[in-house]
Image (cartoon, rainbow, N blue to C red):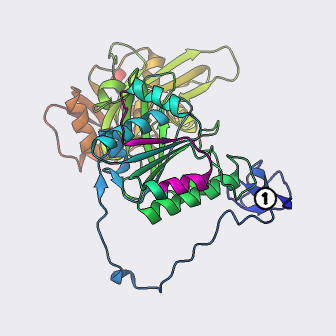
């Protein structure tokens, strides 16, 4: 029997320790050490890769444009940066039931129609289950090969024999290497799996898609090194019980990070949404207080979203501040600015802010829309119909300029909006647009004058 030993690997920084500790001394994170049992005769989980050659000047390295292949789903092509890149390793994660396997099957079907051969490796579903899902989605093709296997060495042999154009691994937490004496999903198994799949992608010039589970915090399960090794990291966002899904690129070596694709979940699979503004402001009415509209930028596209707010009196000594779809701590800052710079006291009221549609807005340009929605609810006065709010608010109550203002205003004009509250400093560099009136605002208290 092979001699075994216990090691403890940090899931945050991947540092190995010989004994368990509550706090990792390397990265300072708490409760991140995970136990692994490794055979003494097993080869290391992260083998050193020796590449022959001598250092050469960067200017002498031969450059060759990489070819892209369209996958047949425009929103997915947009997120990937224009299509599939040969030899790339793509990681896609998201909550259970969000649509990861669905979009992989739909992508495989569209690629098969263009003459490509796809190997779908399923470690969680049988071939019968995949056939049932494919029939429901209308995505059955002879060029999609299904392989229900979890052993990495067997998977590598099949890939070498078949030489497919695209390989889909569903999921990386279910596969294991026979060289590592640890359960599937452990840190050492995920590290070994990622290294072997990277060798397959680069060595065989094959596109490899890897589906990854997420933790309860929403991050991809396993060591952070997994996201560093792959070329592209995609996250599915949205409520699994809702109908809209947002696919976001948080890392992309061959395109723009931060790009998003919008999908609608239907009975026959995911359907592309080419006009996100039409769904995120669907049902918006200027006659209801506590609502405002802002124009946001995600990657290379601009679209409108509705920001809702509800301010209600509370009898508790600690009023609640809830933010859904935007930064929770940023809401506390904006409420402090409203009280200090605009004289609006909300210390005895609960404040709830929601970005409609399930999208998450992280850019500071949403500040003005949040403040206007809160003020509208507190004063019980709706904003004028057709008004869009764009601007970042500083601690002094000043409105700071935001980027891509012209693109935001063009999208607002396309959706029928006729008035825009924008920072005064943005008007100097923004060409006027016929059909939309821009109101320059320097201070947050000036913006609230619109309710008087």
What is the x, y in percent for residue 117? 37, 48
Picture quadrant where residue 114 is located: top left
- What is the crowding at mark 1: few (fewer than 14 residues within 10 Å), some, or many (at least 20)? many
Image spot of residue 323 (x, y percent): 54, 29
Residue 219 shown in magenta: no
**Residue matched to label 1:** 38
The magenta segment is 138-159
249 vs 117, nearest the viewer? 117
Residue 280 in percent (x, y) is at 36, 26
Residue at the (50%, 29%) spot, across then down: 343
User: For this view, does 125 lie left or right of residue 449?
Assistant: right
Q: Is residue 261 left or right of residue 415?
A: right
| Relative to 188, residue 388 above or below | above
Front residue of 380/68: it is 68
- Please, what secondary structure does the residue beneath circle 1 have? strand
Q: Is residue 27 visible?
A: yes
Asked if one can make out residue 265 in the rendered structure from this viewpoint, the answer is no
* Image vertical order of residue 9 relative to residue 215, above or below: below
Q: Nearer the viewer, residue 4 or 333?
A: 4
Residue 312 rendering spot, x and y as whole percentages: 55, 15
Residues 40 and 398: in front is 40
Q: Quadrant of residue 306?
A: top left
């Amino acid at each position: 029997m092979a001699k075994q030993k216990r090691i403890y690997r940090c899931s945050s920084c991947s540092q190995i320790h010989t004994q368990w500790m509550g706090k990792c001394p390397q990265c300072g994170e708490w409760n991140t050490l995970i136990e692994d049992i490794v055979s003494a005769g097993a080869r290391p989980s992260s083998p050193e890769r020796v590449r022959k050659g001598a250092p050469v000047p960067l200017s002498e390295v031969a450059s060759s444009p990489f070819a892209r292949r369209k996958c047949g789903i425009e929103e997915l092509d947009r997120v990937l940066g224009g299509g599939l890149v040969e030899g790339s390793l793509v990681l896609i994660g998201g909550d259970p039931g969000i649509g990861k396997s669905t979009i992989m099957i739909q992508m495989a079907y569209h690629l098969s129609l263009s003459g490509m051969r796809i190997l779908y490796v399923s470690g969680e579903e049988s071939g019968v289950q995949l056939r049932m899902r494919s029939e429901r989605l209308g995505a059955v093709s002879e060029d999609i090969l299904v392989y229900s296997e979890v052993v990495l060495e067997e998977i590598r042999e099949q890939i070498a024999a078949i030489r497919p154009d695209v390989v889909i691994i569903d999921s990386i937490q279910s596969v294991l290497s026979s060289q590592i004496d640890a359960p599937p999903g452990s840190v050492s198994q995920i590290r070994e799996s990622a290294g072997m799949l990277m060798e397959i992608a680069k060595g065989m010039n094959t596109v490899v898609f890897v589906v990854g589970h997420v933790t309860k915090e929403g991050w991809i399960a396993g060591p952070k090194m997994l996201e560093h090794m792959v070329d592209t990291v995609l996250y599915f966002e949205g409520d699994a019980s809702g109908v809209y899904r947002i696919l976001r690129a948080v890392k992309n070596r061959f395109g723009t990070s931060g790009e998003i694709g919008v999908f609608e979940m239907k009975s026959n699979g995911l359907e592309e949404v080419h006009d996100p503004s039409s769904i995120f402001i669907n049902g918006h009415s200027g006659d209801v207080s506590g609502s405002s509209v802002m124009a946001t930028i995600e990657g290379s596209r601009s679209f409108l979203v509705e920001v809702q707010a509800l301010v209600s009196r509370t009898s508790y000594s600690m009023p609640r501040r809830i933010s859904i779809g935007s930064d929770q701590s940023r809401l506390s800052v904006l409420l402090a600015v409203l009280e200090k710079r605009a004289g609006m006291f909300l210390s005895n009221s609960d404040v709830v802010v929601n970005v409609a549609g399930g999208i998450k807005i992280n850019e500071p340009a949403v500040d003005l829309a949040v403040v206007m929605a809160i003020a509208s609810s507190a004063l019980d006065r709706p904003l004028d119909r057709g008004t869009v709010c764009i601007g970042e608010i500083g601690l002094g109550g000043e409105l700071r300029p935001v980027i891509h203002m012209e693109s935001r205003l063009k999208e607002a004009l396309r959706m029928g909006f006729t008035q825009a509250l924008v920072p005064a400093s943005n008007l100097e560099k923004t060409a006027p647009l016929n059909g939309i009136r821009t109101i320059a605002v320097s201070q947050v208290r000036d913006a609230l004058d619109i309710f008087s």
